[in-house]
Amino acid sequence: MLAAAIIGLTTHSAVAQPQHGIAMYGEPALPPDFVSLPYANPDAATGGQIVTAEVGSFDSLNPFIRKGSVPWQLRFFLGESFMGRTLDEPFSLYGVLAESVETGPNREWVEFTLRPEARFSDGSPVTVEDVIWSYETLGTVGHPRYLGFWEKVDTMEQTGPRSVRFTFNIEDRELALLAGMRPILKKAQWDGVDFAESTTEIIPITSAPYVIDDFEPGRFLSLRRNPDYWGADVPFRRGTNNLDEVRLEFFGDETAAFEAFKVGEVNSNREFNVARWESQYNFPAVQDGDVVLSVLPHERPSGMTGFVMNTRRDQFADWRVRDAMIQIFNFEFINEAMTGSAQPRITSYWSNSPLGMSDGPATGRVREFLEPFAADLTPGTLEGYALPVSDGSERNRAGTSAALAQMEAAGWTVQDGVMKNAAGEPFTFEILLKQGASENQAIIDMYVESLARIGVTPTVSVADSAQFKERTDAYNFDMTYYRRGVSLSPGNEQYNYYGSETANAPGGRNLMGVQSPAVDAMIGRLLTSESQDDFVAAVKALDRVLTAGRYVVPIYQWNISRVAHAKELKYPENLPIFGDWPGWQPDVWWYED
């Protein structure tokens, strides 16, 4: 279904007239008079609560800045914006704060008109002044995710009592959509306050459906549905935000979090370990029917999950060393131990989707896009690259042999049982893990045993949430756990993930430190493609460069989601193509006694 939806899209120049929505290519699927999102239940009951278990802690309630450790969900709960993104189309937006959106014929500008009824949680109106302050503040001192967009804005100007226009300084079709997705905050709240400083003393005032009601760092955070929320009848919001309370309970590790779910302190739990799902979800509440086990399919890309190597470090600057680290990682043995071999391996960043790279040599437009960079591409990019497959035995002789050969090619050999260079210096590195991540620790324990077979003894360090964030923000690690979700509509965020300009920006998301002209060029192409065919080819080419670059040791993917939840928590039968993704739970769930 999704492949047909993507390939069937056609390009149309945007008409310069107000519209109810906007799509990256073509027109949005829902008409101007749509009642609700197709995966929401506009008749859902309101009330009840959802309680989830989170591992770690937090020391800030401002998700819009670089500093501080913030519950990851907060930016979705507090970040009300002009437009909202549907989970049932590759990249389409519909009005939330904005009653209409208008673009130039080539999307060189975009203009939004605020709904007159839009209000902040304190009852004050959302104004163009708030909009202009929010965009400028986020674009200059906000989180790095906002900076790239702001650099491409030539002018921002008020064009009417409730209208604001953004004109861009480069050709980039996605900018008109990104402009609609920035959170709009109340300017007056931050008068005389340093917005960029982390704190739990200031709770951001927003126009979103939920407000922070109570919290205690290290223990819990409670969000309450605002009974006076202004946008309950906005089509994008009908049937969403039905639960009276969304509560996050924090625990020191995964074991404690799971035990809390078993005894009813938590009433919804995502399970990423299929072996635990199969063997440990038979406790009394499940047997009695009080807890429901839901398996939910989706059609989104796998993204990349595994252990990333920091190419800023000398140890991992050579692709042959990175290849050796992948060869020695005995995935088939680890997968059997961790999941009973039930989880397929991630094969590329966009695997499990029509945007994933094809097997074998690059052909057609993909090859055409990559050939100008052939001299600088990692071997396998053009010729074809696939992850190694072991025989599943613990010794992994073929992988060990391949790893030794690659290390030798890079100037490292085993001397007296230790991997050393010509100067006799041992090869070693640190693996940084977050406290409480027991599954990752178990995987790394097996990986360390495999590394010993080639004379490598890494140091494994465990840091609490704040220390882990501080170190990864400063790229102060050799190897660490890595999770990068990607979408069916990759765009400007790819520069933040993999772009050369962000490689050394503190707090950025390019953890591997990749600086590749080919990567930059492919991101540029996908942003300026005027046809869906060129867009798909550009993403497939980008996928090749990243995967063959051997920056991450991939583990398994989740092509389904497993959610255990109290029987009172309900969700619509019509699942979006993105499945269980931000914007679905708790957004369209409801509580039914």
Image: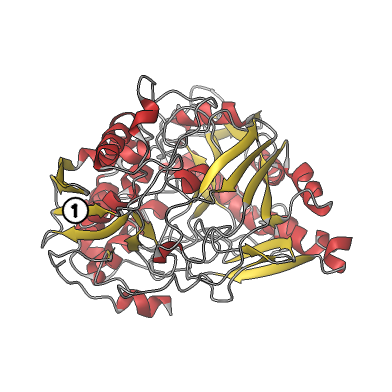
Render colour scheme: secondary structure
Label 1 CA crowd tier, 10 Å (few <14, some 14–19, many 20+): many
Left or right: 75, with 571 as reference point: left
Left or right: 326, with 217 as reference point: left
Q: Which image quarter is the C terminus in? A: bottom right
Instruction: Give the camera-side residue of 558 and 197.
Output: 197
Helix or strand or loop: what does disc 1 sit on? strand
Residue 482 visible to an observer of this rendering: no
* Label total for image: 1
Left or right: 579, with 230 as reference point: right
Instruction: Give the camera-side residue of 308 and 406.
Output: 308
Amino acid at circle 1? Glu
Left or right: 34, with 132 as reference point: right
What residue do we see at 44% from left, 23% from top? 197
Residue 223 placement (x, y as % from top left): 59, 44
What residue do we see at 43% from left, 39% from top? 512
Q: Which residue is mark 1?
A: 111
Residue lying furthest top: 192
Compared to 485, does 430 lie above or below? above
Compared to 307, does 529 lie above or below? below
Residue 287 visible to an observer of this rendering: yes
Residue 228 placement (x, y as % from top left): 49, 50
Residue 8 placement (x, y as % from top left): 30, 79
Displayed quadrant of residue 508 = top left
